Amino acid sequence: MVSNHNVRRSGSKKMCALLFCALLIAIALSVLLYIYSRTYAKANRIGLQLTKNAFNSIMYRTLPHLLGMSVSAIIIAVVSLSFQTITGSRLLVPSMIGFDSVFVFAQTVIVFILGAESKLFVNPYVNYSITAGAMIAISMCMYGMVLRKRRNNIVFLLMLGIILSGILRSSASYLQVIMDANSYNQVRAATAVTVNNMNVGSIYLVAPIMLVVVAIVICRHRTYDVLSLGVANAKNLGVAYEREVNFNLFLIAIGMSVSTALIGSLTFLGLLAVNIAREIFKTHKHLIIFIGSSLVAVFALIFGQAVTELLQGAVPLTVIIDFIGCAYMFYLILKVNKKS
């Protein structure tokens, strides 16, 4: 009996290793497709011959974009899984509850009060620090209060996030309307962040923060395994549940501020990556799902952007991800409703 258990365990490890290898190969192919879409495909489209100097120049601008997409995808996947674990819901991700609104509001307030020429707005490092600080403060106040006092009332958390998001977006829109045209254009350029217009100057600040957050979360994968058993079981097994929730909310706020400030809001990328990884690996071990969802997110973001480049930007990547994400969330809701 023990021998059969060991055989099944060994087979499971081999299957996970094969799946990881398959995802890594898919990511490598998507990177090559993305490079091709920005070099040879674009040169053929406009009828130019791609020289070695031109190729090197394009690659000099392409590599930071690849790094930025990888950073954003990994951090979104990791914090999304962490958030789903502490809330006990596969239908929620942090970006659904107002992080992008806090980002837009913080940028608008800085420009409205201090002007578009202020160092607090122009300097990417200072700007990022202020924006991340605002996200952390607001999210800790809101999420910590709701999850602690209301015992994981997910509906209340979602409603509060939607209301707060609406208030912040409306306030930001009002301030943008009454500010001068130059300041308005500066704010719109800073907040309408896309893959092609990501904040490249912040990548080298973001990467170390991402590595620290991801390392902390993954090293605590056994704690997440216990937290996924529920509040009562986690407490019975010796986990300080309230402290763990608050600490994870702090990490989630930092992670979401990194991705939002760098690449903008990709609301459904985390939802898709985490749930696809759950379906592929068929395990409750968070270490495997952390790695698997990160690889799925990196592949989805890079491959999707490569296809967008080949289609000459006819359909933005965010539109594709949101459309697929909405459809998949609808499927999950129907699936959960059928089980209940």
Image: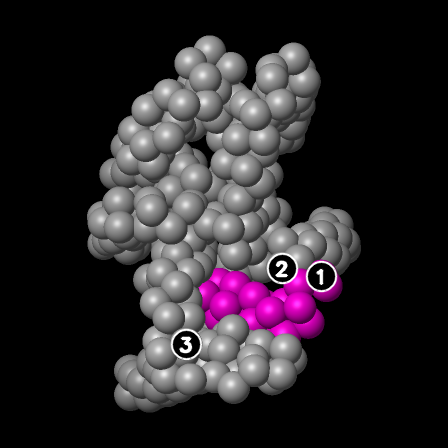
Displayed quadrant of residue 21 = bottom left
Q: Which residue matches tag 1? A: 315
Whether the residues at callouts 1 and 2 have beta carbons within 8 Å, the answer is yes
As for residue 145 lying within the magenta part, the answer is no
Q: Residues within 10 Å of mark 3 (few under 14, many from 20)?
A: few
Residue 54, which numbered label?
A: 3
**Where is residue 299 shown, x and y percent of the image?**
49, 70
> Three-letter amino acid code at disc 2?
Leu
Q: Residue at x 52, y 73 (%)?
A: 38
Question: What is the distance, in whole Å, between disc 3 and disc 1 at their CAs?
Answer: 27 Å
> What residue does disc 2 label?
317
Q: Residue at x 62, y 59 (%)?
A: 317
Q: Closer to the observer: label 3 or label 1?
A: 3
**Residue 25 visible in the picture:** no
Q: Is residue 270 above or below residue 143?
A: below
Label 1 Cα neighbours within 10 Å, binned few <14 / some 14-19 / many ≥20: few
